[in-house]
């Protein structure tokens, strides 16, 4: 919802349902719960808006998502589509302390051990049989 509001300026039930691959009634049920918690403003057949609190939570979650995606892809060499999928799962459950340590680790390894990181990613690519960071060889 955060990205819909940020990119399109409007959040609609049908857009949420399409993105999440669920039926609109499931979205409506979730919106009612979020509205009860004060995270969205939602009236049936009207636009949906994140409240200030909802926006803050969404921004924090999206920030975690971006960091996790970067870590999975650029440090661990995970394929981008898998990194994206995993980040979507992790972002909701990972503790702030863990996020902070990942940030510190990325910064540290990029600054102090760039050669080791490059060697690790090269090894991962060779073992997967692909030529690019984050790609997995076809197993067929």
Image (cartoon, rainbow, N blue to C red):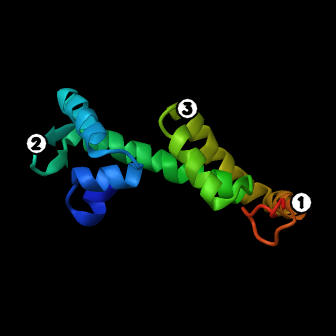
Q: Residues within 10 Å of mark 1 (few under 14, many from 20)?
A: some
What's the residue at 71%, 55% (across, down)? Answer: 78
What's the residue at 68%, 46% (across, down)? Answer: 105
Using residue 3 as the reference point, say whether residue 94 is left or right of it: right
Q: Residues within 10 Å of mark 2 (few under 14, many from 20)?
A: few
User: How far across and how far down the image is residue 95, in percent?
Assistant: 53, 30
First in residue order: circle 2 vs circle 1: 2
User: Residue 12: which quarter of the image?
Assistant: bottom left
Q: Name the residue that disc number 1 marks.
A: 123
What's the residue at 87%, 65% (across, down)? Answer: 129
First in residue order: circle 3 vs circle 1: 3
Q: Name the residue that disc number 2 marks.
A: 44
For the residues labelled 2 and 3, the Cα–Cα distance comes to 39 Å
Q: Is residue 139 above or below residue 64?
A: below
Q: Nearer the viewer, residue 21 or 108?
A: 21
| 2 or 1: mark nearer the eye | 2
Residue 76 shows which numbered tag?
Answer: none
For the residues labelled 3 and 1, the Cα–Cα distance comes to 29 Å
User: How far across and how far down the image is residue 21, in percent?
Assistant: 41, 49
> Contact (CB < 8 A) between labels 2 and 3?
no
First in residue order: circle 2 vs circle 3: 2
Q: Name the residue that disc number 3 marks.
A: 97
Using residue 3 as the reference point, say whether residue 93 is left or right of it: right
Q: Nearer the viewer, residue 60 or 10?
A: 10
| 2 or 3: mark nearer the eye | 2
Using residue 61 as the reference point, say whether residue 40 is left or right of it: left
């Amino acid at each position: 919802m955060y990205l819909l509001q940020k990119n399109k300026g409007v959040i609609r039930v049908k857009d949420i349902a399409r993105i999440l691959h669920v039926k609109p009634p499931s979205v409506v049920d979730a919106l009612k719960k979020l509205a009860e918690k004060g995270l969205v403003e939602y009236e049936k057949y009207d636009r949906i808006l994140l409240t200030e609190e909802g926006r803050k939570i969404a921004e924090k979650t999206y920030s975690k998502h971006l960091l996790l995606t970067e870590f999975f892809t650029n440090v661990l060499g995970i394929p981008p589509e898998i990194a994206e999928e995993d980040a979507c799962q992790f972002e909701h459950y990972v503790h702030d302390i863990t996020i902070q340590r990942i940030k510190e680790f990325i910064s540290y390894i990029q600054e102090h051990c760039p050669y080791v990181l490059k060697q690790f990613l090269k090894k991962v690519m060779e073992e997967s049989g692909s030529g690019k960071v984050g790609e997995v060889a076809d197993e067929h």
